[in-house]
């Protein structure tokens, strides 16, 4: 029996900060950052937005497209490295807001930027195993980069949600694959506010090794080649890495551009490749095949092959498109406002 | 029911009374009212206080304040109806006398607001609104009245200048009141350029945070002359009405239905109409409030309160002076005390004892004291006996 | 500050906009109540509020109560939802200076308050400008 995506949705906050605005504060060279990392601006969450609020909005879009009673959703997995609570699940709030409680299994996922695809992987598998009619996987983050660090130019906010089921599928999952090793490229210790990374080590032995190995392993397993895919989406820590991964694997720019959101969205961490996928589904045509490879530091990649069905055209217009949200009346803020919104200013203790 | 009269009133200088506690402020006003009446005992006491708990951490005010007065065993009752607590305490005192339960009853109001910071005071005041469906969203009292103001401006064409006219007038009156917290003149320009609190209301559209108390002695009218040398003032009407707590639940966002209802009941009780009043003391917690109140009292046509306020109609020397005391705006607004202070001003006006701010030939005055965004209103009509 | 039980009790309204329609006169109560304010009816059927509406009035708060100080200036409005029910909530993601009576808005899930750095996070609805 075929299993796949029956509903999907994304959420993009409206506030933005430009690379120049950050570079100005730290005396960095904006043009070289823009060229080197292929980043122009990034989304910023307001103080009233977090992983939970964005997950709720993305999941509501997914429910609208799925056209199902949320009470039938049997599992919810919210993947994030910025869960608002250290102890207390994000998923309980999201499920309650959707009206999916109380008969539902819930867990928060954490695996750096791979937590979202991880949730999707598990949710999909539960439906495939016949455990439940529908399951929901969400990737969302309001990630923080340390002030002045290279990550500050990319760490952004967004969410994507996927409901998996067996009826009225919009994208069948043809195959999955996972590739993981212990690779200390990026981490955040307990009680630390900002994550740390290992500089250039995050490239070849970390991102590229896992993304390329996962993509190659998945194509070998499913006996496919880049020519079999209309679209591809890779994790987007910046603008440059996914483009280079695509090039090395033999995917043309035209196949990755639709899901390549990072130049104006930034790195939404757990939301990154899932949001890229939602942007592709917004425009995909029946029969299109999509390769999706996530990446999470630590490190690992999840790979999925999706085949878009005839039903896609009936749901694309039921909720806001990802790129439409990305382009919808952005509100630009200065670094001071950004620092206030992101809790980077030391204030009086309450 | 017995007819009721006021034979004594008391009030201290209002303001930021750093050296005085809640109980001291109250006791000073109570003692003054008792002395003014010339009585040697009271049979029961009512105290209006909005939030002793949030402002000074003190509840159980009935017992505490009866004890402060050295009258320990008498029944002491605390009355709460947000900013209408004082007016309602006075009404309860009148009812206690009218019913025959007690003969000499002390009606008081008090609030000590400056022991907490601005944020905490704003929060304490906001508890008069719907906590879960208004305050949860970060609305404040100036914010709620600002939404009423915007609705009034949108619907009736009320202008920013008309709002300012209320503040200018009440401060001009307050200059003549030695007990007022802010007895200074303000100009319309000053009001319209003052710090924004909740758009469109600015700081000079708002009544201040005040420490203060007021008191009145209420007795049966037929015993008034034997109990006191003061000329008795008859309570011709006492009325109370309520409305939905949350502003968004009202049919008309800038019409004070509870005030209109309480006024209707009061006019009926007293057998008079708005044209028969010499002056009014009303609840101008914000400039827009006075505009809405004079409409609901029938002093101005519905929707025309702004124009009426700006026309001089309600100034001292005008056809119907409103807030000769300076109102909440200039005199100050220690929330629980305000309703009783309105009674004090009205009694002094009817005695002809108001000096420079005296309304000429004052024979009948109305007080209107309001809680929340008008979810409670207490109206009294007092006459020379 | 808002404790767990008090917060939790309002979840059906704050998260899912659950209201009650009077079986007798059709008036919608939000939050649900035991007695209809319109006709004193005691029977209700559950309904969900419309999630778009029009700004009836609003203010921009510059002096905030405790806990909201970091957000000033912020807009709060009374919005008439498309089902006729009025609710009070913040209007966010907008230029407060350009907000006007009659603007179309929709509900979004947001953080409303938090009990300091260590207490519970309180979620609920705010309005945002509706697209188009």
Image (cartoon, rainbow, N blue to C red):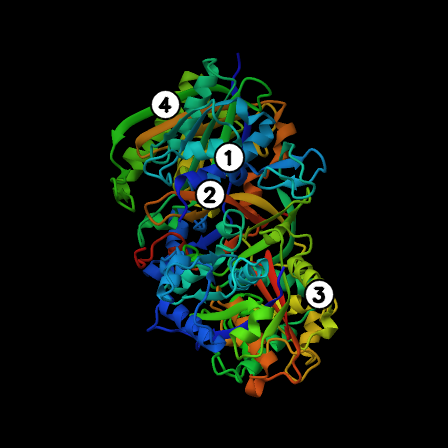
* Circle 1/circle 3 CB separation < 8 Å: no
Q: Residues within 10 Å of mark 4 (few under 14, many from 20)?
A: many
Secondary-structure class at tag 2: strand
Q: Furthest-bottom residue in view? A: B356
Front residue (pair A168, B309)? B309
Q: Which mark is residue C123?
A: 2
Q: Residues within 10 Å of mark 2 (few under 14, many from 20)?
A: many
Secondary-structure class at tag 4: strand
Badge nearest the viewer, 4 or 3: 3
The residue identified by callout 4 is A178
Distance from label 4 to label 3 (Cα)?
82 Å
Badge nearest the viewer, 4 or 2: 2
Secondary-structure class at tag 3: helix
Whether residue A110 is visible to the viewer of this picture, yes or no, is yes
Residue A133 is situated, as x and y percent measured from the top left of the image, at 52, 18
Q: Earlier in the sequence, mark 4 or mark 1?
A: 1
Please identify the quadrant where the C terminus of chain A is shown: bottom left
Q: Which mark is residue B267?
A: 3
């Amino acid at each position: 029996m075929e299993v796949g995506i029956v509903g999907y949705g994304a959420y993009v906050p409206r506030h933005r900060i430009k690379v120049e605005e950050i570079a100005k504060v730290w005396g960095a060279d904006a043009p070289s950052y823009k060229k080197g990392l292929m980043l122009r601006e990034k989304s910023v969450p307001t103080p009233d937005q977090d992983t939970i609020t964005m997950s709720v909005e993305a999941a509501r879009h997914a429910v609208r497209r799925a056209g199902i009673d949320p009470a039938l959703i049997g599992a919810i997995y919210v993947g994030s490295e910025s869960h608002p609570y250290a102890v207390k699940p994000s998923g309980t709030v999201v499920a309650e807001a959707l009206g999916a409680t109380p008969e539902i299994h819930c867990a928060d996922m954490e695996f750096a930027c791979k937590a979202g695809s991880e949730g999707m992987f598990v949710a999909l598998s539960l439906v495939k195993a016949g455990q439940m009619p529908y399951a929901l996987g969400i990737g969302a983050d309001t990630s923080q980069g340390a002030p002045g660090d290279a990550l500050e130019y990319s760490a952004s906010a967004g969410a994507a949600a996927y409901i998996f089921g067996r009826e009225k599928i919009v994208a069948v999952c043809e195959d999955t694959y996972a590739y993981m090793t212990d690779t200390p490229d990026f981490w955040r210790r307990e009680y630390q506010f900002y994550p740390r990374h290992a500089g250039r080590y995050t490239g070849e032995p970390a991102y590229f090794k896992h993304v390329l190995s996962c993509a190659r392993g998945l194509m070998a397993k499913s006996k496919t080649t880049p020519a079999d895919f209309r679209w591809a989406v890779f994790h987007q820590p910046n603008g440059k890495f996914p483009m280079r991964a695509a090039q090395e694997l033999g995917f043309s720019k035209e196949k990755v551009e639709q899901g390549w959101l990072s130049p104006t969205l930034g790195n939404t961490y757990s939301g990154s490749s899932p949001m890229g996928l939602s942007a592709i589904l917004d425009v995909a045509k029946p029969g299109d095949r999509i390769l999706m490879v996530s990446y999470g530091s630590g490190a690992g990649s999840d790979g999925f092959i999706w085949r878009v069905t005839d039903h896609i055209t009936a749901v694309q217009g039921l909720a806001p498109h990802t790129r439409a949200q990305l382009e919808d009346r952005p509100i630009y803020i200065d670094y001071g406002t950004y620092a206030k919104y992101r809790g980077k200013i030391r204030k009086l203790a309450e | 029911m017995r007819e009721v009269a006021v034979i004594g009133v008391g009030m201290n200088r209002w303001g930021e009374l750093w050296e005085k506690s809640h109980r001291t402020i109250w006791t000073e006003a109570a003692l003054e009212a008792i002395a003014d009446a010339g009585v040697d005992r009271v049979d029961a006491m009512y105290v209006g206080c909005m939030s002793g708990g949030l402002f000074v951490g003190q509840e159980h005010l009935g017992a505490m304040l009866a004890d402060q007065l050295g009258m320990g065993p008498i029944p002491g009752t605390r009355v709460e109806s947000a900013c209408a607590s004082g007016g309602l305490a006075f009404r309860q005192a009148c009812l206690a006398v009218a019913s025959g339960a007690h003969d000499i009853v002390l009606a008081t109001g008090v609030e000590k607001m400056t022991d907490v910071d601005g944020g905490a005071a704003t929060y304490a005041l906001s508890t008069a609104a719907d906590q879960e469906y208004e305050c949860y969203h970060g609305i404040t009292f100036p914010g709620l009245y600002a939404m009423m103001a915007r609705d009034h401006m949108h619907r009736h064409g009320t202008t920013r200048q008309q709002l300012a006219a209320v503040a200018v007038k009440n401060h001009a009156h307050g200059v003549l009141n030695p007990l007022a917290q802010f007895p200074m003149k303000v100009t319309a320009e000053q009001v319209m350029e003052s710090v924004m609190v909740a758009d469109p209301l600015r700081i000079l559209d708002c009544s201040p945070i005040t420490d203060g108390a007021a008191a009145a002695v209420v007795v049966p009218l037929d015993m008034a002359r034997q109990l006191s040398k003061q000329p008795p003032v008859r309570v011709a009407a006492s009325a109370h009405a309520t409305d939905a707590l949350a502003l968004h639940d009202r049919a008309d966002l800038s019409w004070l239905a509870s005030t209109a209802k309480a006024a209707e009941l009061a006019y009926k009780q007293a057998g008079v109409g708005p044209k028969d009043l010499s002056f009014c003391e009303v609840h101008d917690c914000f400039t827009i409030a006075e505009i809405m109140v004079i409409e609901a009292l029938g002093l101005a046509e519905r929707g025309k309160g702004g124009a009426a306020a700006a026309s001089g109609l309600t100034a001292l020397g005008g056809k119907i002076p409103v807030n000769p005391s300076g109102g909440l705006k200039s005199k100050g607004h220690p929330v629980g005390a305000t309703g009783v202070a309105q009674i004090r001003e009205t009694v002094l006006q009817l005695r002809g004892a108001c000096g420079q701010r005296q309304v000429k030939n004052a024979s009948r005055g109305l007080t209107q004291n309001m809680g929340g965004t008008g979810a409670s209103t207490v109206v009294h009509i007092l006459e020379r006996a | 500050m808002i404790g767990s039980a008090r917060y939790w009790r309002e979840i059906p309204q704050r998260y899912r906009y659950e209201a009650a329609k009077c079986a007798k006169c059709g008036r919608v109560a939000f939050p649900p109540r035991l007695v209809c304010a319109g006709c004193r009816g005691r029977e209700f059927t559950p309904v969900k509020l419309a999630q778009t509406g029009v700004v009836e009035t609003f203010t921009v708060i510059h002096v905030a109560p405790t806990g909201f100080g970091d957000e000033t200036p912020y807009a709060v409005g009374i919005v008439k939802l498309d089902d006729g029910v009025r609710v009070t909530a913040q209007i966010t993601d907008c230029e407060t200076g350009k907000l006007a009576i009659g603007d179309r808005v929709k509900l979004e899930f947001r953080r409303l308050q938090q009990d300091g750095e260590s207490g519970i996070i309180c979620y609920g609805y705010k309005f945002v400008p509706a697209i188009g």
